[in-house]
């Protein structure tokens, strides 16, 4: 299963260019929760303390991890795709405080020292059953630590486990990976059932004039 998903995300990596050298503000690193450039909130969502320890579930090509490291955080990323991690190491070769690992997010969290925040931007939390992901994240957070994830809002009437199709070559069937979609109130109730408090679930609207969807942003804290 892991090898199949890894190959799918390697394929996805080939379709995505490296992150820009600078954003619209001229910054060389930045945090982005949405599918739109230079749009939406930033790292403040995570409420990280100075020098905090933070984990990116499905870090991809590493832009968000790199940004947190430049803020003085101990920034850790985990991803299934060797191709994505190679892009991260190529794009951010000299960032101190940034550590990248290859593997499955759930497996990686077992036995880890607690984190001040754990997050997922269209990453592993989107593509893992929340009945498994949410307890694992909760157990890996420090008391009061923040979990946040972003993904596409669910298509009306299409809830629960869905299929995402990743195009491959012209003579190959698309790679298929599972994702989990729910309405905002269901996400909020599910986090609360798993012991999260101060839960918020919002849809960040797309930029003015865009015909694309907004971005679902889910956030909660570990109780205690």
Image (spheres, grey):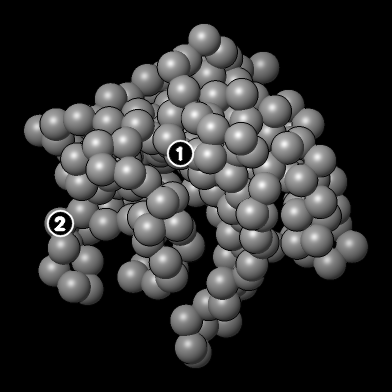
Residue lying furthest top? 111
Does the residue at mark 2 contact the one at mark 1 (Cβ under 8 Å)? no
Viewer-nearest residue: 91 or 95:
95
Residue lying furthest front? 224
Viewer-nearest residue: 81 or 42:
42
> What residue do we see at 48% from left, 88% from top?
208
Tag 1: Cα neighbours inside 10 Å, few (<14), some, or many (≥20)? many
Residue lying furthest bottom? 209
**Mark 1 element type:** strand
> What residue do we see at 54% from left, 48% from top?
148
Q: Position of residue 222 (x, y in %)?
A: 60, 38
Mark 2 = which residue? 28
**Residues at marks 2 and 1, CA–CA distance in whole angstroms:** 23 Å
Mark 1 = which residue? 117
Q: Relative to 56, is 200 on the left or the right?
A: right
Q: Relative to 152, is 184 on the left or the right?
A: right
> What residue do we see at 78% from left, 31% from top?
131
Q: Position of residue 15 (x, y in %)?
A: 42, 47
Task: Give the vertical position of 3 relative to 9 (above or below).
Answer: above
Q: Relative to 6, is 46 on the left or the right?
A: left
Task: Tell me where residue 205 sits by quadrant.
Answer: bottom right
Q: Position of residue 164 (x, y in %)?
A: 69, 45
Residue lying furthest left? 94
């Amino acid at each position: 299963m892991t090898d199949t998903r890894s190959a799918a995300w390697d394929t996805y990596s080939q379709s995505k260019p490296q992150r820009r050298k600078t954003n619209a503000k001229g910054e060389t690193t930045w945090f982005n929760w949405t599918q739109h450039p230079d749009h939406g909130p930033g790292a403040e969502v995570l409420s990280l303390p100075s020098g905090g320890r933070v984990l990116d579930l499905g870090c991809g090509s590493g832009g968000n991890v790199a940004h947190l490291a430049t803020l003085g955080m101990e920034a850790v990323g985990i991803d299934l795709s060797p191709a994505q991690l190679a892009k991260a190491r190529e794009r951010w070769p000299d960032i101190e405080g940034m550590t990248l690992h290859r593997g499955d997010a759930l497996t990686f969290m077992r036995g880890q020292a607690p984190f001040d925040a754990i997050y997922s931007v269209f990453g592993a939390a989107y593509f893992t059953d929340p009945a498994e992901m949410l307890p694992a994240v909760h157990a890996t957070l420090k008391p009061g630590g923040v979990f946040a994830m972003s993904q596409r809002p669910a298509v009306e009437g299409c809830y629960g486990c869905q299929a995402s199709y990743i195009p491959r070559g012209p003579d190959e069937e698309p790679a298929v990976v599972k994702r989990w979609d729910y309405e905002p109130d269901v996400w909020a109730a599910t986090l609360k059932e798993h012991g999260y408090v101060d839960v918020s679930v919002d849809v960040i609207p797309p930029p003015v004039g865009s015909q694309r969807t907004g971005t679902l942003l889910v956030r909660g804290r570990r109780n205690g």
